[in-house]
Amino acid sequence: MAEMLEVSGITKRFGGLVAVNNVSFSVREKEILSVIGPNGAGKSTLFKLISSFLRPTSGEVRLKGERISGMAPHIAARKGVVRTFQETTIFKNMSVRDNVIIAHHLRSKANLAGFFLGTGAARADEAAFGQSADEILALLGLASLANEIARNLPHGHLRALGIAIGLATDPSILLLDEPFAGMNHEETMRMVAMVRRLRDLGLTILLVEHDMPAVMKISDRIVVLNFGQKIAEGTPSEIQANDKVIEAYLGSEDEAIGL
Ligand SMILES: Nc1ncnc2c1ncn2[C@@H]1O[C@H](COP(=O)(O)OP(=O)(O)OP(=O)(O)O)[C@@H](O)[C@H]1O
């Protein structure tokens, strides 16, 4: 399988602290790769480096061979590295459907003002984007909520809307930041099934997550960080049997690595 994203020797220092230390791995096309690790291991920092929210001290990130580290985050997003679940990217006073339509406009670089003012050109775009938005909403189980105002959505559906908005921007790789945080078992299992469905449709997905059972269920491969360093990489069953990983988790206050 071809590599979609390549992280090479990436390091981030904050003063004297090395939050991410010389980490390398690749995300292959059409796989779900999860990054796990005990509290403070460097997961969030790594995520911010990949989405270009932080500039690496050294090392680099490449998307389909093109160096993206150092680009502004919105440029990296246009290139196809799309991070979801930032609730700030959801317009809470707009309908679910309009949120997804607007995300299409961001991709197409069309004039957003036209959308708000209802100009002729924008109306033509809107028809095409509307159809695509409806398909995305159906895919994520949000079709019946299309006309609901976003702020009225329950937690789980708001997460799904975050993914819908990400999909509308036509990502090469979707970055999911703790997609199961705050969800009960049923919501988590629904989200696991949904993300796997996206993978089956050809999406490449990188996620950071604390919920071990969900990570073991959802991932094709897992990268484990501890104290900023990569200590293991492999399939869920390889990771569960890895001595270094077990040791790292036993020494932490996190949930045990087992199921
Ligand atoms: N902006 C910053 N300035 C200074 N130190 C930072 C900054 N961001 C993170 N750190 C430190 O870098 C280390 C890694 O933090 P990071 O948040 O990446 O870990 P994490 O694995 O995401 O943790 P958690 O699971 O608790 O969210 C920690 O020691 C943290 O205190």
Image: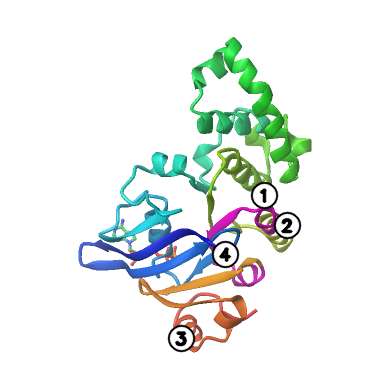
Q: Nearer the viewer, residue 51 or 183?
A: 51
Mark 1 and mark 2 in contact? Answer it, CB < 8 Å: yes
Point out the tag, 3 or 1, that comes first from the N-terminus: 1
Magenta stretch: includes residue 208: yes
Q: Residue at x 62, y 34 (%)?
A: 100
Front label number (4 vs 1) = 4
Magenta stretch: includes residue 154: no
Crowd rating for badge 2 (residues with CA inside 10 Å; few <14, some 14–19, many 20+)? few
Please state which amino acid type lies under the numbered disc 4.
Met
Check disc 4 and report the residue beneath it: 1
Q: Residue at x 68, y 56 (%)?
A: 191
Front label number (4 vs 3) = 4
Provide residue 77's location: percent of width, then percent of height.
45, 43
Please state which amino acid type lies under the numbered disc 1.
Gly
Q: Give the CA separation, mark 3 to mark 1.
A: 34 Å
Q: Residue at x 37, y 49 (%)?
A: 68
- Can residue 178 be seen here? no
Q: Residue furthest bottom?
A: 243
Mark 4 and mark 3 in contact? Answer it, CB < 8 Å: no
